[in-house]
Amino acid sequence: MELLIEALIDTGKLVPLLLVIYFLVGFLEHRYGDRMGDFIVRFGIYGPLVGALFGCIPQCGFSVVASTLYVKRMISLGTLLAVFVSTSDEAVPVLLSMPDKASMVISLIALKLVIAIIAGTAIDLVIRLRKPAITATDSPAENSPHTEEHHHGCCSHGVACHRSDRKLLLIHPLQHTAKIFAYLLALTIALNFALAQIGEERIGTILMSGTIFQPVLASLIGLIPNCFASVLLANLFAKGVISFGAMVGGLCAGTGLGVLVLAKENKRWKESLLIVGLLLAVSITAGTLLVYIEGY
């Protein structure tokens, strides 16, 4: 009972800020969600930069858009990868709601942005050197997808700017906050119980704490196509169970529903596996380098 009460108090403190953040994100999705896809298509070789910037928005809806655009060959592989890597999903709101960890958010976003731009640009450069036609967009104006019809928010809710959808500005942020609160409460209870029964040192050993292999495990967790993974990684970092570098690596691999949409829509399953492999390689490499720099 004591663990439950403590978890309720700790998690309840986060709700007001989570509400503010999700109302803001909901407004941005509702107002601009149907334009983001068309916007990024127009940037050609600068796609990875623009895609990485959009991916920084703390929701996974744009990773879904990017997957759809890639399947239609409207954006390059490097742009898709940049969006995937920079997507922060729920980790940003969760960390912002923790006073002692909020200062880390700027570093997190900046690092993921740099990693995304470097990885995406490098991939496009390699492909362009081998096959120049691959990264070219064929008449964007003609083939531009109707993102108003295809864009979905992070929970697959529509965000097209119609009057009938404006209730989403109120309902979805409340639902999203409630869902994340439930995740946080369950995770806090579980982590507090594990720390009490097993001990922080033993949990750290299980999660390879103090080794450069921790980013590998974190990246595999981050690859889980659900916002639960990013919430878990943020909580593990807040509890001191994983390092900042491992968290960054894990969050670089997190795409929300983006990977699921790619797997569903892309008929070239080998290509989808290659993209997931590239995403993992970038995430593990970045996380490992950061852990090494931290001195693990």
Image: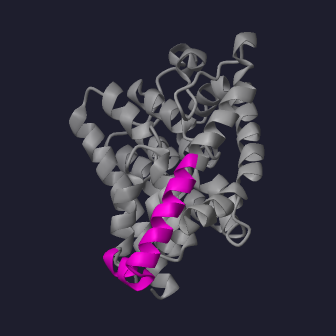
The answer to whether 34 appears left or right of 68 in the picture is right
Q: Residue furthest bottom?
A: 295
Instruction: Establish if 66 lies above or below 293.
Output: above
Question: Horizontal and vertical percent for residue 255?
Answer: 46, 45
Can residue 121 be seen here?
A: no
Q: Is residue 64 magenta?
A: no
Quadrant for the N terminus, please.
Answer: bottom right
The answer to whether 17 appears left or right of 153 in the picture is right
Q: Is residue 184 magenta?
A: yes
Question: Horizontal and vertical percent for residue 117?
Answer: 54, 55
Magenta-tinted stretch: 182-206
Instruction: Establish if 54 lies above or below 39.
Output: below
Q: Judge by depth and name the residue closer to the eye, 217 or 189.
A: 189
Question: Horizontal and vertical percent for residue 55?
Answer: 58, 45
Instruction: Establish if 22 lies above or below 234.
Output: above
Q: Judge by depth and name the residue closer to the eye, 128 or 211.
A: 211
Residue drawn at x 61%, y 25% is 38
Q: Quadrant of residue 3?
A: bottom right
Can residue 163 be seen here?
A: yes
Quadrant for the C terminus, please.
Answer: bottom left
Instruction: Establish if 92 lies above or below 40.
Output: below
Q: Main secondary structure of the magenta part?
A: helix
Q: Residue furthest left?
A: 270
